[in-house]
Amino acid sequence: MPIPRPNFTENTLASCRNEEDYFIHSKALEWTISDPIIIQGPEDIKSKVNWRETLQPFNHQVQNLITFCKRLPVTLLADDVGLGKTISAGLILSELMHRRRVTKALILCPKILGSQWKEELKFKFGIESSFAVGAKQFQEALAINPPVIITTYNTGSTILRDLKNNPFEMIILDEAHKLRNLFGTPKPPQMALSVMEALEKRLFRFVLMLTATPIQNRVWDLYSLIHLLTIAKGHKNPLGTDKEFKEKFIVSDSKGRKFKPNMDAQFRALVKDYIVRTRREEAKLQFPDREVLTCRIDLTREETQVISLMSKFLHNFQKFDQSSLAEALMSSPAALIAQLEKMAVTNYDATKLLQKVVETLPYGFESSKQKEVIKLCNKLRSQKKDWRLIIFVKRIATLKAIGKSLKSEGIEFGFISGNQGANNQKTIDDFRTNPPNINVIVSTDAGAEGVNLQSGNVLLNYDLPWNPMVVEQRIGRIQRLASKHAKVEILNMVCKDTVEERVVLRLLEKLQTISKAVGDIESILEATNYDDDEDFEKQIQDMVIRSLMGQDVAKDIQLKLRSIEIAVETIESEKEFLETTLGNPEGVHESGPQVPKFSKSTPTISFKDFSLQAKKALGLEIQETSSGIFEATNKGKRSELMVFDERRFQELQNQSVFMGNVNLYQPGKTDFERLVQHWVDKCGHYVMNTRENLEIRVETLAREYCSSYTGLIYQSHSIKIKSEHFQGSFQAMAKASNGIDAFEKIIVSEYVPDEHPAFKDIGFQDPPLMDRLKPSDIFKDVAPLLEKKILEDSDLNHFCDFYDKRLDEELIKTGGDASLQKKVQDNFQSSIMVEIYGLIGHRYQEVSFTVTFTKDGKGPYTVALRGIPYNRSFLSKPLIKQCGITGDMVPDSCLSKCDVTGIEVLHHLLEISETSGRKGIPEKVVICEITNKRVLDDEIEVSTKSGAKALKEFFVTCEVTNARILSKESGQCSVSKKIVDKDLLIPSGKNPDRVGLLEEHFICQESGISLLVDEVAKCKVTGLKVDTDLLQKCAITRKLALIRVLVPCQVSGDLCLPETLEICSVSKKLVNPVFLKISEVSGIKALPDYFSSSDVSGKICFLEELI
């Protein structure tokens, strides 16, 4: 299918102050480019910059990202428990945000997972978020406007119905199986209905659903999820309506747990295009075993007394204070004293209890747990040189007390606590080195957020949190996928015969052991009907306080333990049912059209260099004050501190010393994006007008031209033609897009005057820089010029072709429903928009002019030139050639060819023939000896007779010798008419005016005179050749003969040859025979006078012959 024709939008472009501003504007534009959400492999992932320092995703997680992008806009990830679905989702969200497809996302999850989501997003992906529970908190979060808001399904069901001007482009539905009861149940939950309605209204461009258990105990569970996926995609449910599904697939009395015979395979085939699933055995990742051990310690007498005091006083406090005191008691004596000191300010009972506790504990008291920590350290040190131990505590006072004991024993250690980012990082770095610089880390839960401590494999829960998720998060710091340790040891430290042992340890130990097998503490809590970890925590808190106050809670503990066991049984059953029902969809990552490969669109300047140059261009001074920190000052006053590394930024954020305004400049981060947009909007063109001082500029150009050649002296110039032009380039953003994806590409096109019409006169301002303009003000043919480039662009064609194929696939799945087809077309049908964002160049005049000059004082010479005066450049000028005489290089228009030699020389060095007007070099000029004129030597000849030189017109060729001689040196033969050397001619002896060559002469044999051959003839009587004047023609025969041999006719007197005459028989005269008649009687000839005719016969005869 051909690429759609682009639509053009024209912006009014503001002017840049200088070329540097335009450079920054054009580079800012590069950082706004939206790459398509089409990823072939890990090398195409753009968001790495956001997480490469904090995360090394596994192959299946990267593949989930690639597959989501290929299956846009809706996907269900159903990876097994423990494979890091949250990381997969974070990768997807980070990529969409980095590519500017998502600016705000909404996450719905169980409350128990809210804090985990917040931590994962912040510390692994650098994405800030708010965790809001309830409509009020949600509205507050909206006002704060973080990129991500995390909330519960219960809150979500409310806000989705009332969401006005939805700011979210994406929704992530974690533990999406909570939406499973849409069908196959008499009353679907309102939460699931609210989500379904939001998806049907297409409130979100992108939808990602996560669950490890898409089927829990009914096939209806997956039908509900598939239904949500199809309405979000605009598909018709491939499983049919709920009624059709039930009739076709489900055994009627199985409560939705059994397929009809041979229908399970068809079911799997229909749903495989909607589920992306990786099983643990397929991921092939090492997940360290968890060994949970308990370290039970005997209480000292003093500690027993303190617990007794607590039991007596606890009922005097409010419930909140009771909880704080109980938690402090179980942490350490130091923590209890610190808590009481804080409360004693306003609470008399706290003052009294504090006094008694202080009296009970001697100065410098070291608790039994502190002593046990030292024993544990010594044991580990004896086992391994590079031993490591992580100790988790809840209270700062406890942390400091442990540190004091470790220091006294000379054990190298470090602290991790809240708001100590730089110190925390040093502690972590020292712990990770091989061998470690410190062997022990003592950390609070708050300080360990986002920290990876997997270099250690022994974790000590010095005090036990009442929230099981906190315990799991502690363990998660060391028990990680692909850990180098085959096993991690979890030590729970409790004092014997205490509430901590009887209540907290029993429940948490059970959960820790089960989680080792099940791998998902959230699922266990959910199966026990504790969707909220805080609910479970409150239950433990209540039992702890009641037990401290002397109440028996053994029965309650037993019920809780049993509910956990039942939950495990349920989960195992659901796992088996899931495997049986869903199996493993094969080829899920390979389905769909072939993903195209696009050319790289990496910005040509790094985000750091761009940020620094952009700030400097705004007038700020930038100086690196310390490693990775740049101070921007304005007129000596600090404007801000700039950092470009996420980790460095976090360190500065966590430092207790006030650093001032520290901003992180990275793609996708607010400050960087704001700076980029500022420069995109700030200016758009740098078009200079250079028309002023034209005459002066042209003269300068003319003088420069003359000075570039030896001996050329400028005289004057004359402007002939002026035309207005633009030369430069423009940047256009071509955007191929559809409802879910877009591909932007900067098209840079050079505007060359020779290829385009002259500049459109728009009335440029002075000074030369224009304030605002539209590209069409400059040239009319922008659109067709760009359109040709865009239609031929391979990347834009690949994008449109890919989504054309996706459109064809998706339309098939609408089942012909017109409304669904409209949704699909809105999602996948591509169009192309083009906006011109940048223009740089010059508005200038082209001038055709002549320049007049002298050469070596001779001239004047004039050449025609065409040039651009403002930049003193020439568009056309004469060729340069060498003068054949002087050897100087000069304009070819100053040269003329010598018409004799063909050599090109300066005009003034040539002479002109006075007869032909032809030109020649001086040595080729001679004087004609006939005319005395100066002519070219190829116009003359030299007489071979006399050596005289004259124009060729005065020469002839001797027809005897072929010699060239002057006309005056020749003559013409009177006989042959040949032109010959006159010295070869001999005059006739009879007529001297007549001449001839020697061979044309003959001696008369009668007179002996030399005559021309045409003056001699042969006598037919004597055979002599004689002068024609001595000959006469015989009157009868017409033959020439000497006069002296001819005889006259005695009748006519004509001379005749003797033998031609006859005798009259009567008169005896010699006469011409024509005068004689013959007698018809006798046959005798005689003159007519002697004849008569017979009267009878009429015959002619003599008279005497008549009778």
Image (spheres, grey):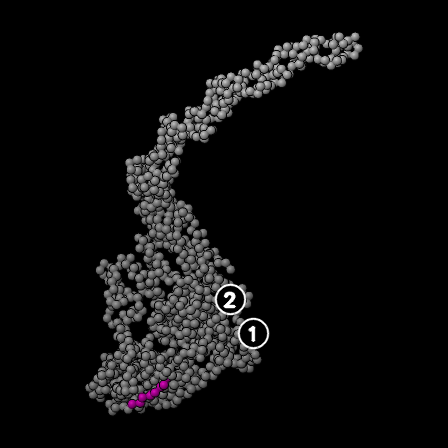
Q: Disc 2 marks which residue?
A: 810
| Vertical placement of residue 616 versus 959, above or below | below
What crowding class fits label 1: few (fewer than 14 Cα within 10 Å), some (14-19), or many (20 or more)? few
Q: Residue at x 34, y 87 (%)?
A: 293
The answer to whether mark 2 and mark 1 are in CB contact below 8 A is no
Quarter of the picture holding the C terminus: top right
Residue 192 numbered tag: none
Depicted 843 relative to depicted 603: above or below: above
Judge from the rendering whether residue 152 lies leftward or rightward of residue 1076; answer left or right.
Answer: left
Q: Quadrant of residue 90?
A: bottom left
Query: In what element is the residue under mark 2?
Result: helix
Residue 28, given in percent of the width and then of the height, sits at 35, 59
Give the SS element for disc 1: helix
Q: Please state which amino acid type lies under the numbered disc 1.
A: Glu
Residue 406 quadrant: bottom left
Q: Which x, y percent locates residue 385?
A: 28, 84
The quadrant where residue 555 appears: bottom left
Name the amino acid, label 2. Glu
| Position of residue 139 in the picture relative to residue 575 (left or right) | left
Tell which tag, 2 or 1, sits nearer the viewer.
2
Query: Mark 2 packing: few (<14 Cα in 10 Å), some, or many (20+)?
Result: many
Magenta residue span: 290-297
Q: Is residue 412 in the magenta section?
A: no
Q: Percent from the top left, x then y, of residue 18?
A: 30, 53
- What residue is shown with label 1? 244
Outermost residue, left side: 363
The answer to which of 609 and 161 lies nearer the viewer is: 609
Q: Residue at x 73, y 13 (%)?
A: 1079
Residue 920 in sight: yes
Q: Disc 2 or 1, which lies upstream in sequence?
A: 1
Magenta span: predominant SS is strand
